[in-house]
Image (spheres, helix red, strand yellow):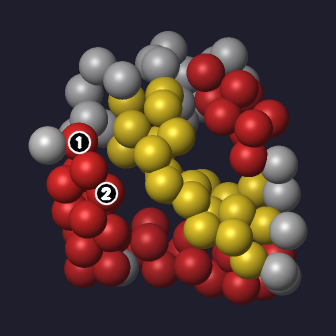
Amino acid sequence: MYYVYVLFNKRNQKDTYVGYTNNIERRVLQHNAGENASTKGREWELVYYEAYLSEHSARERERKLKHDGRVKRYLLERVRKQFE
């Protein structure tokens, strides 16, 4: 199983990170341990994930979220409403 996930910075929820992995628990721990240059030095909280059977499908979804502003905006609006 592969996962596409969204992390929010615990101090600034406008700061987000989108990624994919086959082990979501380990990956969140790596982000919080500073093992990823893009997320180093900040505390992250997993706020959303989607599960996929194939790595290809997960990579495609991650790519769309990272590179298509509308897709990312709609998803983040939906996720942020949970915190209001």
Q: Amino acid at mark 2?
A: Val
In the image, 80 versus 38, the foreground residue is 80
**Residue corresponding to mark 2:** 79
Quadrant in which residue 3 is drawn: bottom right
> In the figure, is residue 24 to the left or right of 18?
right
Q: How many marks?
A: 2
- Check disc 2: other Cα within 10 Å, few if <14, some if 14-19, many if 20+: some
Q: Is residue 66 above or below residue 43?
A: below
- Check disc 1: other Cα within 10 Å, few if <14, some if 14-19, many if 20+: few
Tag 1–tag 2 contact (CB < 8 Å): yes
State the image coordinates of residue 49 (x, y, percent, origin top left).
56, 59
Q: Is residue 26 above or below residue 78?
A: above
Q: Which mark is residue 83?
A: 1
State the image coordinates of residue 66 (x, y, percent, origin top left).
44, 67
State the image coordinates of residue 45 (x, y, percent, origin top left).
48, 32
Q: Amino acid at mark 1?
A: Phe
Q: Quadrant of the N terminus?
A: bottom right
The residue that appears at 68% across and 16% down in the rendered structure is: 33
Quadrant in which residue 10 is drawn: top left
Give the residue furthest to the left: 84
* Mark 1 to mark 2 CA distance (whole Å): 8 Å
The residue that appears at 66% across and 34% down in the rendered structure is: 28
State the image coordinates of residue 13 (x, y, percent, origin top left).
26, 35
Q: Is residue 12 above or below residue 16?
A: above
> In the figure, is residue 6 to the left or right of 31?
left
Q: In this view of the protein, can residue 42 be seen by the observer?
A: yes
> In the figure, is residue 38 to the left or right of 59?
left
Q: Which mark is residue 73?
A: none
Q: Secondary structure at mark 2?
A: helix
Q: In this view of the protein, can residue 36 be seen by the observer?
A: no
Q: Secondary structure at mark 1?
A: helix
